[in-house]
Image (tube, rainbow, N blue to C red):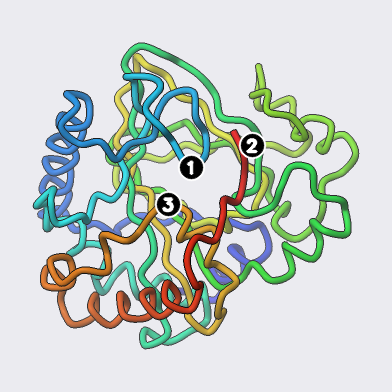
């Protein structure tokens, strides 16, 4: 990967890349997504993102879903997800974006973003681990330490859901941006946010982004969506990512049934996550409300 791509990621808070899913693996992942989406929608898989809830805990108040949680879970039996998460191509990009070695990588989340079937809606503007109520100084302090992990969306269908404000991972919100991102109300038009752009991902493309960039998303019930939604951390960051990651409920990852499904690289990455889990001392709370 050229230095310019690393520079782009650091400067604007995101970078879009293609070619990280080999052609023979693309159809395998798509088929696995079809199966887990079906199991989620028919009520067989309870770990889901529930319409009406933007952040964990997601609850079960609505039968419609906008995401599938924990797709590497051994009870799903879909080995394609862990194989891709631990693949050479993906790990190479992550290590370069985080400026770390493969031996520093920490396994984190692998979920799936899907279209709801009966509700079109939007998620509000947010940063993943900074409260919308944070003062300018609190926001600046939080942004300054958020460089020990990277999040990504990989589209299996064309995806026009994500809106971001380039460069906002490095600076607090302006007064106008703050006025449009300080409540639980989703935007009527995301492009009303100063500096916002809409990203379009073509099948097989990935956007890597700093999850504390100012971002939101729209969900169209009429447009098929299956977007791999994952993150990976640099264990040298210590506990900085504990709340944002562990709030999703990762106790299932502590057992041997999951460990045994992983290759050597995956097992090493998992061991670093389990160290974080152990050192956190229990429930770490939730990053955001809503």
Task: Give the farthest residue toward the top.
Answer: 118
Instruction: Work out which quarter of the rendered image holds the C terminus and state it.
Output: top right
Q: Earlier in the sequence, mark 3 or mark 2?
A: 2
Alpha carbon separation for disc pair 3 and 2: 28 Å
- Residue 197 image label: 2
Q: For numbered disc 1, what is the local secondary structure?
A: loop
Image coordinates of residue 80 in percent, x first then y, are 14, 56
Q: Residue at x 58, y 63 (%)?
A: 9
Quarter that holds the N terminus: bottom left
Give the mark nearest the N terminus, 1 or 2. 1
The circle drawn on residue 154 is none
Precedes in sequence: disc 3 or disc 1: 1
Task: For marks 3 and 2, give the one nearer the viewer.
Answer: 3
Q: For the residues carrying marks 1 and 2, which lies nearer the camera in this image?
A: 1
**Mark 1 highlights which residue?**
56
Tell me if residue 262 comes above or below residue 158 in the rendering. below
Gap between marks 1 and 2, in whole Å? 26 Å
Q: Residues within 10 Å of mark 2 (few under 14, many from 20)?
A: some
Mark 3: few/some/many CA within 10 Å (<14, 14-19, 20+): some
Q: Relative to residue 204, is residue 90 depicted above or below?
A: below
Name the residue at 86% across, 51% down.
135
Q: Residue furthest front?
A: 282
Assign a secondary structure to mark 3. Answer: loop
- Which residue sits at x=37%, y=16%? 221
Q: Nearer the viewer, residue 91 or 64?
A: 64
Q: Are marks 1 and 2 in contact (CB under 8 Å)?
A: no
Q: Which residue is mark 3?
A: 248
Quadrant in the rendering for residue 82: bottom left
Q: Give the x, y percent position of residue 166.
A: 68, 49
Q: Position of residue 189 (x, y in %)?
A: 66, 20
Q: What's the residue at 16%, 29% (across, down)?
A: 38
Task: Please say if the residues under marks 3 and 1 sit with CB atoms less than 8 Å apart.
Answer: yes
């Amino acid at each position: 990967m050229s230095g310019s791509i690393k520079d782009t990621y650091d400067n604007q808070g995101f970078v879009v890349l293609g070619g990280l899913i080999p052609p023979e693996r693309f159809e395998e992942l798509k088929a696995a997504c079809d199966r887990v989406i079906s199991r989620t929608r028919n009520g067989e898989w309870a770990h889901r993102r529930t319409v009406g809830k933007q952040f964990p805990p997601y609850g079960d108040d609505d039968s419609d879903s906008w995401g599938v949680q924990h797709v590497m879970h051994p009870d799903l039996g879909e080995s394609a997800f862990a194989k891709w998460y631990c693949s050479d191509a993906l790990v190479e990009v992550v290590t370069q974006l985080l400026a770390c070695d493969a031996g520093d990588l920490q396994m984190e989340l692998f979920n799936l973003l899907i279209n709801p079937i009966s509700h079109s809606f939007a998620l509000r503007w947010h940063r993943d681990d900074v409260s919308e109520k944070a003062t300018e100084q609190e926001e600046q302090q939080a942004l300054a330490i958020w460089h020990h992990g990277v999040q990504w969306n990989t589209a299996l269908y064309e995806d026009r859901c994500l809106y971001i404000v380039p460069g906002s991972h490095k600076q607090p919100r302006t007064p106008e941006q703050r006025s449009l991102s300080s409540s639980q109300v989703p935007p009527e038009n995301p492009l009303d946010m100063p500096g916002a752009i809409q990203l379009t991902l073509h099948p097989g493309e990935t956007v890597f982004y700093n999850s504390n960039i100012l971002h939101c998303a729209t969900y169209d019930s009429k447009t098929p969506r299956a977007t791999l939604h994952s993150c990976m951390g640099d264990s040298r960051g210590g506990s900085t990512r504990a709340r944002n990651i562990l709030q999703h409920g990762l106790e299932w990852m502590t057992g041997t049934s999951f460990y045994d499904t992983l290759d050597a690289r995956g097992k090493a990455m998992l061991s670093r996550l389990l160290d974080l889990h152990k050192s956190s001392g229990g429930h770490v709370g939730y990053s955001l409300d809503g």
